[in-house]
Amino acid sequence: MLDVALRRGGALGPRSAIVSMSSGGMYGAALDPDALEATDAAGHDGFLAYAQHKRAQVALTHYWNSLGETAPRAWVMHPGWVDTDGVRSALPGFRRFFRPVLRSAEEGADTALWLATTRPRLASEEGIWLDRRLDAEHAFAFTRGGASPEALVARLQARAAQALGG
């Protein structure tokens, strides 16, 4: 996987920081590695695909932090609801309703920049950073029953090996 190759090459060390920008979209899905790859264009659900990929970022963060003291530290954060091009084009009704509380790009980036510079002590419990504090990563009980971070990593390693002809 990329993190292993970067560590071997010296680009990621124990003092490195990985900050992943997830999204509130991840609150809508339990992790399902099979759902990360669209195989049927007719049955493709863009919202579910987005939720799965954002949930996978959370799982990868847990995995990276389980690798021990010689691995880089990782944090995953949620920027809040930001008025992006994606929100404008994919969720116009959402944007009209929530426009008074939508954040600017700068407001959305604040926690990512704070995490990269402050590097707060890693919490042993689950969580996603929002507004410089650790928040719950599950808004709904059904999202707790998904695949483990290790299952996701095994799937990604298998796909990488396949892509490299291995």
Image (cartoon, rainbow, N blue to C red):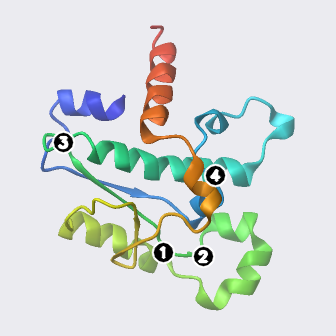
Who's the residue at 67% across and 69% down the image? 87
Query: Residue 152: where, in percent of width, then height?
Result: 49, 35
**Few, some or many C-alpha atoms within 10 Å of disc 2 (few <14, some 14-19, many ≥20)?**
some
Q: CA distance from mark 2 to mark 1?
A: 7 Å
List the residue tagged with mark 4. Answer: 50
Q: State the residue in front, 145 or 64.
A: 145
Q: Nearer the viewer, mark 2 or mark 4?
A: 4
List the residue tagged with mark 1. Answer: 105
Could you say which disc has been placed on residue 68 in the image?
3
Q: CA distance from mark 3 to mark 1?
A: 33 Å
Q: Secondary structure at mark 2?
A: loop
Q: CA distance from mark 3 to mark 4?
A: 29 Å
Question: 104 left or right of 10?
Answer: right
Query: Residue 16: where, in percent of width, then height?
Result: 18, 49
Q: Nearer the viewer, mark 3 or mark 1?
A: 3
**Few, some or many C-alpha atoms within 10 Å of disc 3 (few <14, some 14-19, many ≥20)?**
few
Q: Mark 3 or mark 1: which comes first in sequence?
A: 3
Who's the residue at 19% across and 27% down the image? 8
Q: Nearer the viewer, mark 3 or mark 4?
A: 3
